Amino acid sequence: MKRFIGFRKPAACALLAGFALMLLAGAACTRNKELPVVRLAYTRSIDDLPFFVGMEEKLFEREGVRVEMTRLTGNTSALAGVMRNDIQAAVIGLPQVYSAAGQSIPIKVVAWLGRTHPGTHCGLHVRKDAPIYDLEDLRGKRIAVSGDVSSRMVVYQALEQGGVAAEDAQIILGLEMSEPMQHEAVLKTGKVDVVIA
Amino acid sequence: MLRSFNDILPGYVFTGVYFSDRYLASHAREVRAFLRGLVRSFEFIKTNEAAARRHIPKYTGVSDDVARKCALRDLSGGGREPFEMLDRQRDLLVKHGLFKNKETLKGIVDYQYLP
């Protein structure tokens, strides 16, 4: 009889422990589902890294909100989504903020996602064997720029700093270079001399 | 690299995150919670850069190697950037013919929800 009771006791404890764990897990799931949801449109840019980290490290949930991310390309799509409340937040470039301000669009930018710094690898890239050593060497060169306004401004500013008029360089728009590896590939083709990446 | 973005435009700000005015008026608590989480992300990236970089491939599709090398932003501003600096960028846009009017950001940028 004693041996029989002894056998049942650990099994009962294990059952109770398992039940308690299930209750705790269920409670956690319920808490998570009860958190208000913020749907955020993102663009796969490196600027969105804080969102990726917030999601993976559960930093938003710790502060009391659940974030659902949706990839959207194009400021117009994102803005339409925010205005309809299909999504609650989106990313916007600084030039587009000024444009929105000029049109009195009812949005507010509530935070910026960082700035360039001296160690950045983003900039004007050339092939290693190219005879382009300084900004003044951009004269007559073919410079591939994605369509966004910021990249174009960087090019114009670089040309000015090199003492090169914009019309003295060949600025090529429209090359799709949204992926980092495409920048290197475009340079290797020899069809352009400089890429902005 | 011939010149970095920072060489040409020191401290250049690329993007921000926004909400509609209507949502802000009725969900200030959610926006504040979201931004507390965002600022924690900034801190995490600054203090755990290698761990932060490991999250890049899942969302961007780039390789681990690219994720290890790509440039990150300076997040020391905690989400806030001085209006004077932002306006300098606007002035460059106008100077280079990429923007027509010198709009002000005072009515469309609001840092009150940041911690």
Image (spheres, coloured by chain):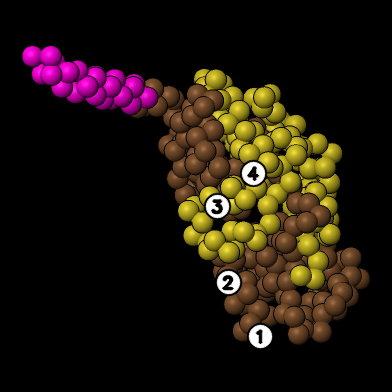
Chain colours: A brown, B yellow
The residue identified by callout 1 is: A190
Closer to the eye: label 2 or 3: 3
- Identity of the residue drawn at 80% across and 71% down: B2
Q: Amino acid at mark 1?
A: Gly
Are circles 4 and 1 on residues that touch, CB within 8 Å? Answer: no
* Mark 4 vs mark 2, CA separation in Å: 28 Å
Q: CA distance from mark 2 to mark 3?
A: 21 Å
* Chain to which the residue tagged by mark 4 belongs: B
Residue A31 screen position, x and y as percent: 39, 22
Dot 3, how many residues are within 10 Å of its Cα: few (below 14), some (14-19), or many (20+)?
some
Query: What amino acid does circle 2 point to?
Result: Gln
| Main secondary-structure element of the magenta-colored stretch | helix
Q: Earlier in the sequence, mark 2 or mark 1?
A: 2
Residue, disc 4: B48
Mark 4–mark 3 CB contact (< 8 Å): no
Q: Which residue is mark 2?
A: A182
Image quarter for residue A54? top right
Q: Are marks 4 and 2 on the same chain?
A: no
